[in-house]
Image (cartoon, helix red, strand yellow):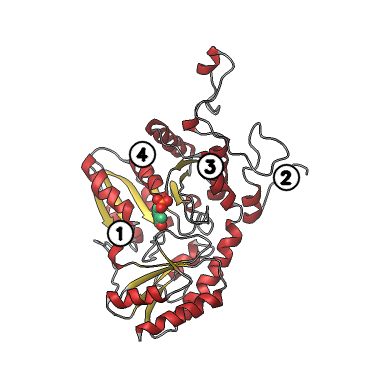
Amino acid sequence: MSAPQTPKGPNTRLVHAARRVKGMAKDLVNPPVERASTILFERAEDLYARRPEQRYYGRYGTASQSALCDAISDLEGAAGTVLAPSGLAACTLALSAVSKPGGHMLITDSVYGPTRNFCDQILTSRGLEIEYFDPRAGADLQNQIRDNTCAIFLESPGSLTLEINDLPAIAALAQARGIPTLVDNTWAAGWFLKPLAMGIDYSIQAATKYHTGHSDVLMGAVASRDEAGAKLMHQYAFLNGNTVSPDDAYLTLRGMRTMGVRIAHQQQSALKIAQWLSGRDEVMRVLHPALPEHPDHELWKRDFTGASGLFSIVLDPVSPEKVHDFVNALSLFGIGFSWGGFESLVIHCDPQIKRTAGSWDASGPLVRFSIGLEDTDDLIADIEAALAVLK
Ligand SMILES: *Cc1c(COP(=O)(O)O)cnc(C)c1O
């Protein structure tokens, strides 16, 4: 095989990114798992004369981690990527790195619950002021910016209620004031949304979801728009002793090779199921941004190139027991946290929803589906049978 040309399409890039690392055997398809704490040097004086990119201790990564970083940087269009041991750890690493003593942070009100808990319980205890804003605020967010605002944290769409943030508008108003912006980009997997190209400074992934794709690895990543941001995140992770295992990095990169085809199937299947659900009497609303009736559909169309397999429905008001009967009656959907794997999942969301700002008005119980790789018609038949318990 001759040297690959500059790859063009996103699937070609995903297949070819980060396939060669220094020193690896020429006949291997994949960069190997390099397990190491100690890395040996030839001579005593080499230990302190190392080049910045040279590996020198396992905590700072081997080829396994750096290949994954390179692949995620390629996917996100990033100047650099740091890994974290979970998606939540990536969110907290990035938030900690941009935090300032006495600072004020603006956080989207539909943010992932554990990220919210970190803000409320850790950042506030370190003297930061946390303020939540309406996910649909858009350019109006400028009214909530203060002199000491040190970061704006977004998540688009919110992973339970699916509101979309106006990323270009918020990036523009933050850049004009020198305020860093971060987005939890897990729903779109860095595949259907490119926040860094819109001027957002940090794109955060729970790579646990679509990147790994098989519900068996925890992994997080922070991809930075520019060199200064990449250096800040790298330095923060470095000083904290933050690290991930080479085996998990290997599995995540292996998952990424097929992410494009998996997510394309999941997109199609989820959309068909969402459309079918929107015609059902038992369902009050379907929260899927690719449906024209979604309140942020126009924003989604403008900013995203597609939709992943995660969406929610609002059922007509019934008791929580009835919702549980419905969820329990599904036979092809596992009940459990996380999403983005090859298998379909479902959860009843109401106990998780915590809102203090903005426009969320459920008016019925919320159920979230993560659509996997099963045949769509089988999933629809399963949901149809389960809906019968609501009658
Ligand atoms: C799952 C998830 C996370 C956390 O990822 P973990 O790897 O489970 O820690 C963060 N943000 C969003 C939007 C998620 O769905």
Compared with 22, 125 (above or below) is below
Disc 4 and disc 2: Cα gap in Å?
Answer: 37 Å
The label number, if any, that marks residue 97 in the structure image: 4
The residue that disc 3 covers is 247
The residue that disc 1 covers is 109
| Earlier-in-chain disc, 3 versus 1 | 1
Identify the element where label 4 is drawn. helix
Amino acid type at image mark 4? Ala
Compared with 336, 31 (above or below) is above
Quadrant containing ligand 1: bottom left
Picture coordinates of residue 45 (x, y %)?
54, 12
Disc 3 and disc 1: Cα gap in Å?
Answer: 35 Å
| Earlier-in-chain disc, 3 versus 2 | 2
Seen from the viewer's position, the closer of residues 182 and 220 is 220
CB atoms of marks 4 and 3 within 8 Å: no
Crowd class of label 1 (few under 14; some 14 to 19; many from 20; radius 10 Å): many
